[in-house]
Amino acid sequence: MNSHLDHFEVFPWNKNFETGVEIIDEQHKKLVTLLNELAGTLTQDNQVEVNRVFDELAEYANFHFETEEAIWVEYFGDDSWLSSHQLTHSSFLPKVVELKEQDTNKSLIEIIEGIVKFLIRWLAFHIIDNDKRMAYVIQNMQAGLSLEEAKVVSDKKMSGSIRVLIETVLAMYDGLSSRTLDLMRERYKRQKVEEELHNANKQLRKANTSLEKLSITDQLTGLFNRRHFNNMFLREFKRAYRNTTSLTLIIIDVDFFKKVNDNQGHSEGDRVLVQVSKEFKKLCQRPGDYAFRLGGEEFGILATNLESQGAIEFSETIRKSIEQLGIPNVYSDISKNLTVSIGCVTKVPDKADTTDNYMSIADARLYKAKELGRNRVVTSN
């Protein structure tokens, strides 16, 4: 939502703030930008973002002070004007930190609004009165005057009506900042209401859709069901083709599961499927991994951004993990424990590929794994 608030400026830059020293003017503009960003962030009551921008502003202010003082010292040496200027700089951050850590009974918004107002007033006055005054001295020294002569000329230029103007401008900025922050808060509140209304409408639309469309979970295992597999497979296939990235399809079949069902009943068969499914969920930890029950004792896993070797290792990890669960299967011809056979295909989809031919390749490899004795992974033809 930050983007909606970017156009608000509590401290608009004005050419009158320019000192004539290019690098200083550039850095002042950056400080003003950070100040406006801080104000925009605060209205959202986001402590993490507030601290990020606050720290960035403080760090940049230190950098700016060092740059500026290096320029001044070249002309002012150990003059009292420079000492006074450095003292102003050194008191800046402690004051800001003091404001930030003040009355804990105040809300974050109230505390930071006070900081923003302080920053506006301090920065405007410091630029117009202090920095411009120093810059005038440099300009006059470059024109041939001595330091003392240049200071006198600068003082005259900055006296009288200029001071009245400064106070007027600062008062204007105080009022402007308060009104702008109020507008920003109101806009943010309105956007929150609109967002809540949008979410309510979205939920209402969902409630009006059929239960069949909403159901994407297999009731027994808690994995995604076949319908959701079809949708996700097509979506990830298109994305992989568009982004030229690999997509892995792993088809898994529980070895000799029918014998478990036939001899011990469906309740025991269901218990075995639930145990196996829990392990699949545990193994699919990456954001791009999805586990599905495709039907009966057949399962599928989609994995994105896995290269060939990674897919082989992932498939082998699945096979070993199921065997190591130690689920007894006295009806198995190959192991005392329950095992699985796996067919895997991983590739970057091209124009000739479809989800159907992915399935055909994975199914063929699964069949080959069974032919070769089960409890194994086949990843090539």
Image: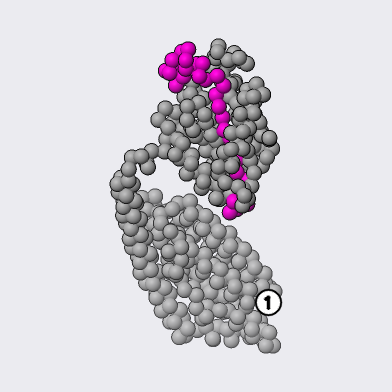
**Residue drawn at (32%, 56%), measured in percent from left and top?**
193
The N terminus: image quadrant: bottom left
Q: Quadrant of residue 361?
A: top right
Residue 155 vs 206, above or below: the answer is below
Q: Image point 54% across, 67% down: which residue?
A: 31
Measuring from the top left, give residue 64's x and y in whole percent.
Answer: 60, 66
65 lies left or right of 40: right
Was residue 180 drawn as part of the magenta stretch in this picture?
A: no
**Residue 194: x and y, percent?**
33, 58
Q: Nearer the viewer, residue 313 or 100?
A: 313
Residue 153 spot, x, y in % from top left: 59, 86
Tell me the element at label 1. Answer: helix
Q: Which residue is mark 1?
A: 75
Q: In the rendered picture of this protein, how many numbered marks are placed on residues? A: 1
Say whether residue 366 is visible: yes
- Is 262 included in the stretch rendered in magenta? yes
Residue drawn at point x = 38 percent, y = 68 percent? 180
Quarter of the image for residue 68 reads bottom right
- Residue stretch in magenta: 241-270
Q: Nearer the viewer, residue 2 or 22?
A: 2
Q: Nearer the viewer, residue 79 or 282?
A: 282
Decide: few, some or many residues near mark 1? Use Cα within 10 Å; few <14, some 14-19, many ≥20: some
